[in-house]
Every structure is written in C-alpha cells, then in structure tokens.
Amino acid sequence: DAMVIQNPRYQVTQFGKPVTLSCSQTLNHNVMYWYQQKSSQAPKLLFHYYDKDFNNEADTPDNFQSRRPNTSFCFLDIRSPGLGDAAMYLCATSRSNNGANVLTFGAGSRLTVL
Amino acid sequence: GQNIDQPTEMTATEGAIVQINCTYQTSGFNGLFWYQQHAGEAPTFLSYNVLDGLEEKGRFSSFLSRSKGYSYLLLKELQMKDSASYLCAVRDSNYQLIWGAGTKLIIKP
C-alpha cells in the first residue's frame, strides 16, 4: 500500500541534544509538510516543500531545519531541543496544495525531551 | 486573524447521533476538511466540502454554509471506535490550511 512512513515513532532526547526525524512516502506526492502537534492543540505547520521549493512558516524557530534530498524523503532536524519542543511531529504529503488535495499523514514521531 | 472554532469535548451514547460544529473566520475560502484523529495517532481524512450543502459518506455526513462560515460533521449509529478527536480545517485564499484544535468525542456504552 502506498503510504507515509515516519521514523522513529518515539524519540527520547536530552535537552540540547540534536534530533533528526525522517519521513518517506511512496505516494509520489509533490508536497511534503512537517507539523508540530501538542496535546489537544491544532497541528502547527512548521514548513513545507512544493517539489524542491522550501517554504518556511514565519513563526517557525530557527532551531528547526528541514531537508528534502529527493521526492520520497524529507527530514526534520531539531538542532537544540528544548523542553517546549516535546510534541508529536507529523509528516504529511499531498499531490498539490490547492483545491481538494487531501493531506495523507504519517503515524507521527513523538518526541520527549528530558 | 484567522480562526477555527470547535467545541473542546462532546459526549454521546453508542448507537446515537452526534453533530460536531465548526465555525471559521478566514481570509478567503477554498474548501473545508474534516479529519479524524485517534489518541496518539495521525489524522485521517473524512470529508471535504467546497460548495454549500450536505455531503454524505456512509455513517458520516458533512455540511457547509459558506455565507455563515459554518460546517458540521454528523456521525450516525455511533460505535465505540468513533471515540476520537475530530479536526476541522479550512483552506484559505492563499491555499494555507487553517486547523481547529479538534473536538474530543467520547462515546459511552
């Protein structure tokens, strides 16, 4: 089945220790998104790629970086995690970013910061 | 600013019907989505409305009124597995998705 796969599902890190989360997709979608979601809150868009074009949200901290080496893979790097960065990180893809294009989400990576 | 409002939590009984409301104030409108999210899992797509009216899909229906900035998700014949959060999201004029915080639905036997 075509899908979006995130690794790891659970990540525990220490305050300030860099973390990389990965996302891969077999849907051949052009757009890939990274969202941060805290408990009982709306998903917050960090950035997205339309093909190779990177789009950073204005309020995404510099601590968060991303790479998309090819169509299928996307990475989220958190350079110096703080306690406030503990959250579920969701990767999503879509064929395009307009109209009825539905986002398909991965299962998420839950980050704990000690 | 842009805003999506949904009730924080609702409770309903197995076998009954529940309506989850969503009101929005956005810069333009290019469609409204409903997603289901079970605890600790990723959101999954339920429905999409871009024109006024009711879209029915099995036990789930979604309604849209663009003039009122209002939508609802109707769940019939509730099952225990329907216990989840239901997220409303609107695509604005810049094709940005604006998300609500979700409505946690608790189903009781």
Image: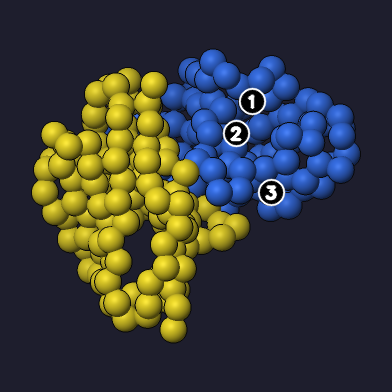
Q: Position of residue A37 (x, y in %)?
A: 58, 42
Amino acid carrying label 1: it is Ser
Q: Along the horizontal axis of the image, is A12 left or right of A7? A: right
**Chain A, which colour?**
blue
Q: Quadrant of residue A98?
A: top left
User: Which of the two residues, A16 or A20, is positioned nearer the viewer here?
Assistant: A16
Instruction: Tell us which disc is closer to us: 3 or 2.
Output: 3
Chain for disc number 3: A
Q: Which chain is yellow?
A: B
The residue labelled by disc 2 is: A74
Q: Mark on residue A110? A: 3
Q: Secondary structure at mark 1?
A: strand
Q: Along the horizontal axis of the image, is A88 left or right of A97? A: right
Q: Alpha carbon of mark 2 to alpha carbon of mark 1: how far?
A: 7 Å
Question: Residue placed at 61% from the left, 43% from the top?
Answer: A38
Q: Position of residue B65 (x, y in %)?
A: 15, 42
Q: Say if residue B77 shows up in the picture.
A: yes
The residue labelled by disc 1 is: A66
Reading the chain from its start, which is encountered first: label 2 or label 1? 1
